C-alpha cells in the first residue's frame, strides 16, 4: 500500500549553465538526474536556502541571476509519496567558468555537466525540464514558470 502524503515540501533548485551544459545531480543508482538544490528550512528565505544548499552540496558560493518560476509536482521515490513545490533559480557558481569536474558533498552521489541538447539522455526529472530548460536558454523568456501537476501529467513527466 502506498503511503499518504503528509506534507508539502518547499524546495529550491538551481539551473547552472556553463558553455551550453547544465549541471545535474545523479541519484545513487544513476537511473535519473535532477537539478541541484534542496529543501527550504523553517524560517529560511528561498534565496538563503539555495545558497546554503549549494554550499553543502558543492562547497561553492553562488550568484542568483533570476527567479525562473516553480514546479508543483507529486511523485513517488523509493516507495514514498511526495508533494513538492520547487522554486527554480538561474544561478552562477562562483569561480566556475569551465566544464571541469566538480566534487559533490552531503547526500548527492555525484554531479556532472550535460549538454543542453542531451538532457533526455541524462533522464532529467521531472521530464518537462528536458524541454523547458532549452526553451528558457533559447528564448530567454520574461514569463515566470508556473508548472502545475496537470502540465507535468500531460507531458508524462513523473
Image (cartoon, rainbow, N blue to C red):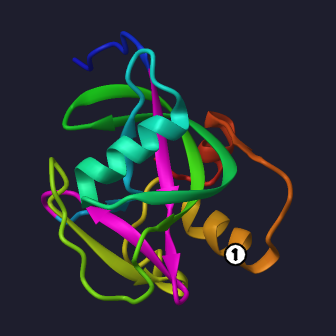
**Looking at the image, how many numbered discs can be counted on the residues?**
1
At a point 40% along the width and 76% down the height, the residue shown is 95
- What x and y, as percent, mark residue 41? 38, 23
Indicate left or right for 17 with 142 as reference: left
82, 94: nearer the viewer: 94
Q: Nearer the viewer, residue 2 or 69?
A: 69
Left or right relative to 94: residue 69? right
Residue position for label 1: 137
Q: Is residue 60 left or right of residue 10?
A: left
The stretch drawn in magenta includes residue 19: yes
Task: Tell me where the magenta segment starts and ends, as one range.
Answer: 9-29
Quadrant housing the N terminus: top left
The quadrant where residue 31 appears: bottom left
Residue 105 sits above or below residue 78 on the image: below
Please indicate, yes or no, whether residue 127 appears anywhere in the rendered image. Answer: no
- In the displayed structure, 101 sits above or below 141; it is below
In the rendered structure, the answer to whether residue 53 lies left or right of residue 13 reads: left
Residue at the image position 37 percent from the left and 15 percent from the top: 5
Percent across and percent down for residue 107 are 15, 47
Q: Would residue 9 be seen by someone viewing this image from the given angle?
A: yes
Q: Quick one: SS at disc 1?
A: helix
Above or below, 103 against 100 in this view is above
The residue at 25%/27% (across/down) is: 80
| Magenta run includes residue 97 | no
Query: Residue 45 at x, y = what percent?
Result: 52, 28
Residue occupying the far right of the picture: 142
The residue shown at (71%, 68%) is 136
Of residues 76 and 22, the one nearer the viewer is 22
Number of residues whose C-alpha sits closer than 10 Å to that of mark 1, classed few (under 14), some (14–19) or many (20 or more) = few
Q: Main secondary structure of the magenta part?
A: strand
Amino acid at each position: 500500500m502506498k503511503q499518504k502524503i503528509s506534507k508539502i515540501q518547499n524546495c529550491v533548485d538551481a539551473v547552472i549553465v556553463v558553455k551550453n551544459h547544465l549541471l545535474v545531480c545523479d541519484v545513487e543508482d544513476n537511473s535519473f538526474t535532477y537539478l541541484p538544490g534542496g529543501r527550504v528550512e523553517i524560517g529560511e528565505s528561498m534565496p538563503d536556502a539555495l545558497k546554503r544548499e549549494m554550499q553543502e552540496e558543492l562547497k561553492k558560493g553562488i550568484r542568483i541571476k533570476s527567479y525562473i518560476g516553480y514546479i508543483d509536482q507529486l511523485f513517488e521515490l523509493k516507495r514514498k509519496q511526495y508533494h513538492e513545490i520547487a522554486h527554480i533559480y538561474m544561478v552562477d557558481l562562483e569561480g566556475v567558468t569551465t566544464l571541469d569536474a566538480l566534487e559533490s558533498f552531503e547526500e548527492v552521489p555525484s554531479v556532472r555537466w550535460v549538454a543542453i541538447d542531451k538532457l533526455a539522455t541524462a533522464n532529467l526529472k521531472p521530464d518537462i525540464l528536458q524541454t523547458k530548460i532549452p526553451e528558457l536558454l533559447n528564448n530567454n523568456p520574461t514569463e515566470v514558470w508556473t508548472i502545475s501537476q496537470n502540465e507535468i501529467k500531460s507531458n508524462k513527466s513523473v
